[in-house]
Image (cartoon, rainbow, N blue to C red):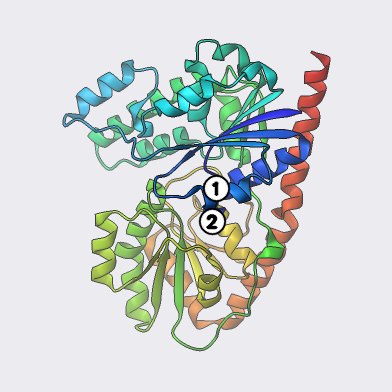
Amino acid sequence: MKILFLSLLPYPPNAGGRMRGFALLKYFATRGSVSLLAEVGGGLNDSEYSAALNQYSEKSVFVVRGDRRIPIPGFWWKDRVSGFLATVPWELGYAPLPEFERKLSEIKLETFDLIVANRICFAEYLVKLKNGNEFLNKTIVDVDDVILRQYEQRAAAAPSLSKRVKHSVGAMILKRHYKNILARVHSCFVASHIDREYLLKNGISKRVFLIPNSIEVDNCKSEALLSSGPPNLMFVGSLDYWPNEEAVIFFCERIWPIIKKRIPDVRFTVVGSGLSTRILSIIEKQEIDLAGFVPSVGPFYEKATLCVVPLLNGTGTRIKILEAMAYRRPVVSTAIGCEGLHAVHGENILIADDAERFAECCVKLIQNVHQREYLANNAFEFVKRNYDSLSFKKAMEDFCNSYENRHNRS
């Protein structure tokens, strides 16, 4: 099978989206010949990723992305009106990349048996091509994060009418946009059964495959929990992803002061790139440790007493939770944070939604090493049983066998 893989750079696999993209690329390389066309952030040298990715793709073409954010005009109601009339919503925050469009137009799409769009924006490139629509029936889109549901969540929880209207309009635009793309492609992937049911129930896609996130458990060096020294809480996640930014702000402003008052020597470490000025100012005031981007999270997990996932919005499933469990670190999460994982409160995770209860869960774990070990060991067995790479490979095999059978019949 000849496969074209359209993606953001899926390397290094040290963040949720790149980990999933890299896993998909590696698997498809076992099913046929893969050509990779990827957008690359500025400041990277070819030598940093070409050698690794060329193991899995016969041909790799990289397009430097740089900054392609759309400037936001000053009057939000004008933005919403113009966005509502647009084909592609500006709420997604990025403009198309002309160089990527040009590179894609030079590729003979008819020579490929399967086209993989690792985000919905890469399927948009196909739609915009002169003859791109005729290849949508052999295109799959990985929608591991259904942003549409996030807008609906924000609208439901909005504290004011203006914000409720703002997010509701954004949700309407995105729903139309999702249907315009996903109803026309062969099928789509999601990471959560909740997202799958949502897309099917709302008629957004007719064929949705559940491809769970996974973690290479054997690659996670799981050290024993440290019982000496100051306790250290840790959050891992890219902070240019707004649900993560919102989560860190919520934790720092509402939860961290309660924990700090109860346990004065406790530390909190934030690991992740893309810091905003607001987060930086909060971190400086609260004396929180900022690691920023790191090449490997392993050493930070070794020093962590527990991991926190205080998300208030989000879809898909959190690889950061699976990763923490694989490193045998107990996790305290909101219900949204662990949505779709089937983790059980008190058995392999602690779940709390309000600030006081979340803080209390953290304090209890810090003070009780036996409960930490109980949760961590159960979590490790849980992730190994349900989210090791074998479960991912089984789901991918089922999809590929189904696709190849349909392809051969047609």
- In the rendered structure, which amino acid carries the disc numbered 2? Asn
The residue under the point 72% across, 42% down is 27
Whether residue 227 is visible: yes
Q: Quadrant of the N terminus?
A: top right
SS of the residue at dot 1?
helix
**Is 400 on the left-hand or right-hand side of 346?**
right
User: Which of the two residues, 203 or 224, is positioned nearer the viewer here?
Assistant: 224
Q: Residue furthest bottom?
A: 228
**Is 279 on the left-hand or right-hand side of 151?**
left
> Residues under labels 2 and 1: Cα distance?
7 Å
In percent of width and height, residue 39 lies at 48, 37
Q: Quadrant of residue 259?
A: bottom left
SS of the residue at dot 2?
loop
Characterize the local packing of mark 2: few (<14), some (14-19) or many (20 or more) Cα atoms within 10 angstroms: some
User: Which of the two residues, 329 or 49, is positioned nearer the viewer here?
Assistant: 49
For disc 1, the marked residue is 18
- On residue 47, the disc is none
In percent of width and height, residue 227 lies at 54, 86
In percent of width and height, residue 387 lies at 69, 53
For disc 2, the marked residue is 14
The residue under the point 27% across, 61% down is 280
User: Which of the two residues, 282 or 104, is positioned nearer the viewer here?
Assistant: 104
Characterize the local packing of mark 1: few (<14), some (14-19) or many (20 or more) Cα atoms within 10 angstroms: some
Q: Quadrant of the C terminus?
A: top right
The residue under the point 69% across, 19% down is 111
Whether residue 348 is visible: no
- In the rendered structure, which amino acid carries the disc numbered 1? Arg
Q: Are marks 2 and 1 in contact (CB under 8 Å)?
A: yes
Question: Count of labels shown?
Answer: 2
